Image: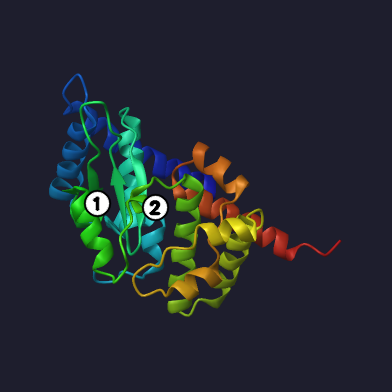
Amino acid sequence: EPEAGAARCRAALDALAVRLGRRLPRPLEAADAVKALSAQLFAEDGFRGNEVDYYAPQNSLLDRVLESRTGIPISLSVLFAAVCRRVGVQLDMIGLPGHFLLATRPTPTTPRTFVDVFNGGRLLGLRECEEIVTSYGIGWSDSMVTPVPMSEVWTRMVRNLHNASWRAGDVTNARLLEHLLACCSASTTAAARAARPPVPYPGVSAEAAEAAGGGEGTQASHMMMSVPEMQALLQMLAASAQVQAAAPPG
């Protein structure tokens, strides 16, 4: 049941947050939470980026990431940010071309710090972000570290799952995910899409990303804000799409 899966995800995230909270100093700084959670997840619990089977569908499902302790940049970022949020630290999602990071929010005395959770919670500055982008042969712009909305995070996760399903030969799920992507992009105008082209991921061409769709969906955005655990959203919308596909026309 999707609701049961979502409850298990929340319970697991809550437990991680309780452990994190016990080791944090007061007053709390975002950098303290990031460093402590990196030690907890990657050094103690063995979470890591799945470099062996990067394109496996389970890397985009949060319950599987929690069970296997492996994932891809965006799913590990969602997990990391969800735990930090539970101890009062808000992190921004940063969708670089070819990679996905988190960032602390700047204060009058502290600049942003970028967090590469796929690589063990490595802390980065703006120059390192630029090096990641240019390593893919893409020109750098400071706008690339603008935080992305949760609706875009949702769309990218569904797109990743869609691409993984096609790679695995799972046509049924791939078609279902195409339906979800179409729902997400239905409210996006052509002008908006042209103003913010899809960002390619490793092994996925810009043309394929464009074909998969990259728009924001109002419904998905509202749901994501109330249910940041992506697994619940994926399962519930997938079930909804199946019902809609089976319904007679008219």
- For image coordinates 24% across by 32% down, the residue present is 30
Q: Is residue 50 visible?
A: no
Q: Locate residue 76 relative to residue 237 in the image: left or right.
A: left
- Dot 1 amino acid type: Val
- Label annotation for residue 62: 2
Q: Locate residue 51 relative to residue 25 in the image: left or right.
A: right
- Label annotation for residue 117: 1
Do tag 2 and tag 1 residues touch (Cβ < 8 Å)?
Answer: no
Q: Nearer the viewer, residue 200 or 108?
A: 108
Quadrant for the C terminus, please. Answer: bottom right
- Dot 2 amino acid type: Leu
Within 10 Å of disc 1 (Cα), the crowding (few <14, some 14-19, many 20+) is many
Q: Secondary structure at mark 1?
A: helix
- For image coordinates 33% across by 41% down, the residue present is 81
**Which of the 4 image quadrants contains residue 172?**
bottom right
The picture places residue 210, in percent across and down from the top left corner, at 52, 69
